[in-house]
Amino acid sequence: MKKTYLIFILQIIIITAYSQNKNAYQIFNSKGKKVNYQKMMKSVKEADIILFGELHNSPIAHWLQYEVSLDLVKNGNLTFGAEMFEADNQDELNLYLRDSIDNKALDSLARLWTNYKTDYAPLVDMAKNNGQKFIATNIPRMYASMVFKNGFEALDSLTELEKEWIVPLPIEYDPELPCYKNMLTMMGGHGGENFPKAQAIKDATMAYFISKNYVVGNKFIHYNGAYHSDNYEGILWYLKKDKPNLIYLTISTVSQANVSQLTKENKGKADFIICVDENMTTTY
C-alpha cells in the first residue's frame, strides 16, 4: 500500500513538472523577472492609462486583454479604446453601444478587422454591457496611406470635417526615435522616409483620441499592436507630451520558443511582457 502511494505521488510530481515545462505563456516585468497575473494587475490598477500591446493574431493576448479589462471594469469606471477602430467610424460604434444597431449592421457600416468577431467583439460587448465608452482612436487608413505616399503635407488637403478624424496638424515628429528609425532598417531603405511618418501619424492620432477622451478618475485601457507602444515610444511618447503627469502602464506581447526565460531583446519593451509560446495556435 505504501509503495503504491509513493508511486502515485511520484507520478503526480512528474506530471506537474512536465506541465510546468509546457506553459502556454509567462508574464515578466520589464527586467525579465517572472511575475504572476495578480502582481501585474496590482500595477495595472494604479495606472491612469494602460496601453495593452498585442500580437494581433495571438489568442493568449486577446484572452488576457479580456481578463484585464473585466477586472478593471469591476472596480470602477473604465473607458475602452482601440487601434482596430478608425475615428470616422465612431458614430457607428456609438450606435452599436447604445443598442441602436446590431452586430450585422455594425459590420456593414464600419471597417471592422477580419478577426473582429473572435478577438475584439467581446471587448466591445463588455463596454456595451457595462455602459462604458469605447473610443475609435486610429486614423482612417486612407489618410495614413496619403502620408506614406506624400508625407505629412498631404493631410493639408483634407476638409475641416476630415481633419476632425486625425490629430491636429502639424504634428511633432522625431525621426531619430528608435521605433521610427528602426522601421527604415527593417525595410532595407525601400519604404522611404515617409514609411515611419505613416506610423507616426497613427501613433499621434491614437494618443490624441486617448488623451481627448481620458476622464480624471476613470481609467483608460487601449488595445494596440505592440509596436505602437513598445519601448515606451510610439503612442506613449505622444501621450507624455500632452499629459506628462498621468500614470501610464504598458504591456507588450512577444513570442518565443522558450517562455521560461525572457530573451535579452524582449527585456525592457514594456512594464509587463506577456511571453507566448511560438507554437501557440493563432486566430488567423
Image: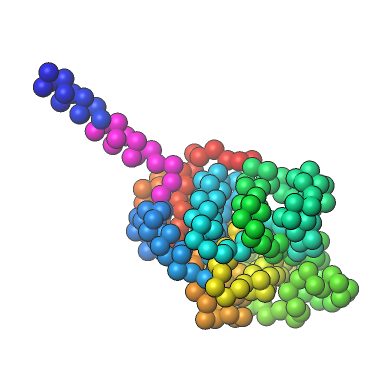
Q: Would residue 241 be visible to someone looking at this image?
A: yes
- Residue 26 screen position, x and y as percent: 41, 49
The C terminus lies in which quarter of the figure?
top right
Q: Residue at x 54, y 38 (%)?
A: 281
The verdict on residue 166 being magenta is no
Quarter the N terminus occupies: top left
Left or right? Give the position of 279 relative to 100.
left
Q: Position of residue 172 (x, y in %)?
A: 67, 80
Q: Which segment did they paint magenta? A: 13-26
Image height check: is 115 above or below 243?
above
Asked if residue 212 lies left or right of residue 28, the reply is right
Q: Is residue 93 visible?
A: no
Q: What is the tally of numbered marks visible in this picture?
A: 0
Quadrant of the rendered image containing residue 225: bottom right
Q: Is residue 25 rendered magenta in the image?
A: yes
> Which residue extends farthest left?
2
